[in-house]
Amino acid sequence: MPVLNRAWQTFRRCLARTDTKDASVEAARDAAAHRRNRLVSSVRAGSRRVFRVFDRVMSWMQQTQRDSDRTRRDVIRCERRANRKSLTLLLKQLSPEQRQEFRRCKHFHVIGGSTGERYRIRVDLIGNIDVLRQDGRVKYRLCVRPAGEIPVYDVMAAQLLHLQDPDTEQRFLQRGNVLSALPEDHICLRTTWVS
């Protein structure tokens, strides 16, 4: 029986080893599953935090865009109001003939106060004063504009007043930048001049 006893002992040891192996494998699997679960839960928690931050940033950006749009609309509204007021002021400064010409052609003619030169003032931001010859062709253009954001019709009204005044015409012309006439500027519509 000692042989059977030894065989039995060996068999039990083998069974115990497989149980310990199974237990250690099972423990390792449980530990890996636990680590994986912790990792998944921390990733989920982190992604929830990231999405919350993303939502906050998106709502902030949308609010900023709405505020910017509102500000832009207010600025445009103010600019339009300023342009309407400046157009009204310009039309009050013009003679009836100049007003009619301005409404029809978007420019008007002026005779210089001290030199007697003929000028055509157009609605433009740069180089909008044409110095005309007797036949109506453009000699050269002048660019005289104050610094800053001023409505174009206010600039035109100031140019009109400076050119018509005998005391300020020469100083105004000295301050202007002289530009060459453009090829399309050589032909001017004939208008009646009141001297």
Image (tube, rainbow, N blue to C red):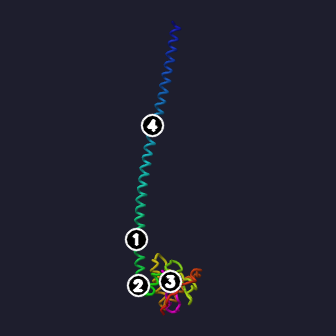
Given residues 7 and 189, the one toward you in this image is: 189
Name the amino acid, label 1. Answer: Arg
Residue in the image at 47% along x and 25% along y:
23
Name the amino acid, label 3. Answer: Ile
Q: SS class of the residue under badge 4?
A: helix
Residue in the image at 43% along x and 44% along y:
45
Is 34 covered by the magenta stretch? no
Name the amino acid, label 4. Answer: Asn
Nearer the N terminus, badge 2 or badge 4?
A: 4
Q: Which residue is mark 2?
A: 92
Residue 71: quarter of image:
bottom left
Nearer the N terminus, badge 3 or badge 1?
A: 1
Given residues 191 and 23, the one toward you in this image is: 191
Inter-mark Cα distance, 2 to 3: 16 Å
Q: SS class of the residue under badge 1?
A: helix
Residue in the image at 57% along x and 80% along y:
184
In the rendered structure, find residue 159 and report the number of the disc placed on it.
Answer: none
Do tag 4 and tag 1 residues touch (Cβ < 8 Å)? Answer: no
How many marks on residues? 4
Q: Which residue is mark 3?
A: 121
Q: Which residue is mark 4?
A: 37
Name the amino acid, label 2. Answer: Lys
Q: Which residues are magenta?
A: 105-121
83 over 72 or under it: above or below: below
Inter-mark Cα distance, 1 to 2: 23 Å
127 over 10 or under it: above or below: below
